[in-house]
Amino acid sequence: MYYRRIAKIHLLSIAVIAVIISSQPIFAQGNIFGTVSNSDATTPANSEISFYGYLDNTDEEIRIEGCVGAGYDNGNWFDDFQNYLTEAPGDPFNFHFCNSANGEGYILSSTIEVGSFQQEDITLSSTNCPGKPTGLTGRATGGPAIEIGWTAVSGLTYHIYRRDASSDGSFFRIDDPPGFLSNPGVVTSPYIDTQVDGISLYDYLIIAENSSGDLGPHSDIITQSSNSFLCGDVNNDGDINVLDLVYFINFKYKDGPEPDYIESAEVNGDGDINVLDLVYLINFKYKDGPDLKCPQP
C-alpha cells in the first residue's frame, strides 16, 4: 500500500513537470504586453496614452486600456486575450495606440501566438488619424432608449460602443453589431440606442473614422441610465395634470407612495423636493410659468 501511494505521487510529479517543460503550454494564449515609446524615444505619461484592441478583423468587441486585465503604466502596456469572448491561437488582432499629447500613434497588427505570453514593443510615429471625439452627452428617452450625442466633425463618421456599466470588460459596437470594419459608422449626432432595458446603467464611447478609413483614439466614457420619465409626471401616467399635484401632496405630506421616478417631482432643479416644487409645477401647468427642470437619473 505504501509503495503504491509513493508511486502515485511520483507519477503525479512527473505529469506536473511534463506540463511545465512541454513545448505546448497549458494555456494556449494569454497576456500580451510590451513597451511604448514616442518617436523621440521618450516615455509617454500615463495620462497621455490610450489604446483599444479587437480580434478577427472586426470591431464587434473592443477592449480599451481601462478594461479589466488591460492597462498602461509608465511606458508599459498590457492586455489579456483570454478576456475576449472569442480568441484562439492564430487569430488576427489589431491594437490602436494614440498619444493625446503629441498626436502620435501606432497600429499593431499580428496574430495570437501559441503561448502564455506575447511581447510586442511599440514605437509611436506621426499619423493622419482623426482626433478624439468630444462633447459626449447622454439622456434617457421613452421606449426605452438612450440618446448619445457628441460634437460631430464634417468628413468624419463614428463607431458607437456600449457595455453594461456594472462591467469593467469589453465594449460592443452597437451602430453595426457584427463590427464590419468596412462599415464607416454613423455620420450625424445624436445616435439613438434602443437596445436598452429601461432599468440599467450603460457605458458608452465612440471612435471617429476619416474618409481614408483611419480610426482615431477612443473618446472618454460616458455613463447613462436607461430610466426615462416625463418631468412633472409625478404619478407616471404619461400626462401632466392635476392628478400629479394630488400625488405630490399625498407623497410629500400625507405618507402616500413615492413616485416611480423620484426625479419627476424635483421640477425646479434646486436639488430638493419640497413645496417650492409644487408651486413651480402649478405655475408651469396653469400660469405659463418656466419650463420644468428635473434632473436625469
Image: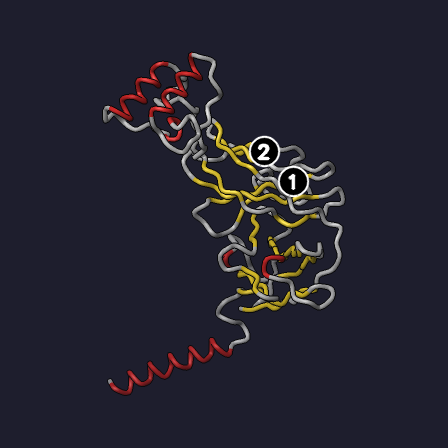
Instruction: Give x and y (percent) for residue 64.
Output: 56, 53
How many C-alpha atoms fall within 10 Å of the one at disc 1: few (<14), some, or many (≥20)? many
* Lateral position of residue 113 relative to residue 230, left or right: right
* Lateral position of residue 261 relative to residue 146, left or right: left
N-terminal label among 1 and 2:
1
Q: Gap in Å between the C-alphas at discs 1 and 2? A: 10 Å
Instruction: Give x and y (percent) for residue 157.
Output: 68, 39
* Lateral position of residue 215 relative to residue 5, left or right: right
Secondary structure of residue under mark 1 = strand
Q: Identity of the amino acid at label 1?
A: Tyr
Q: Which residue is mark 2?
A: 191
Outermost top residue: 286
Tags 1 and 2 in contact by the CB under 8 Å rule? yes
Q: Which residue is mark 1?
A: 158
Instruction: Give x and y (percent) for residue 121.
Output: 65, 67
- Residue at the image point whose x is 46% and y is 30% from the top: 144
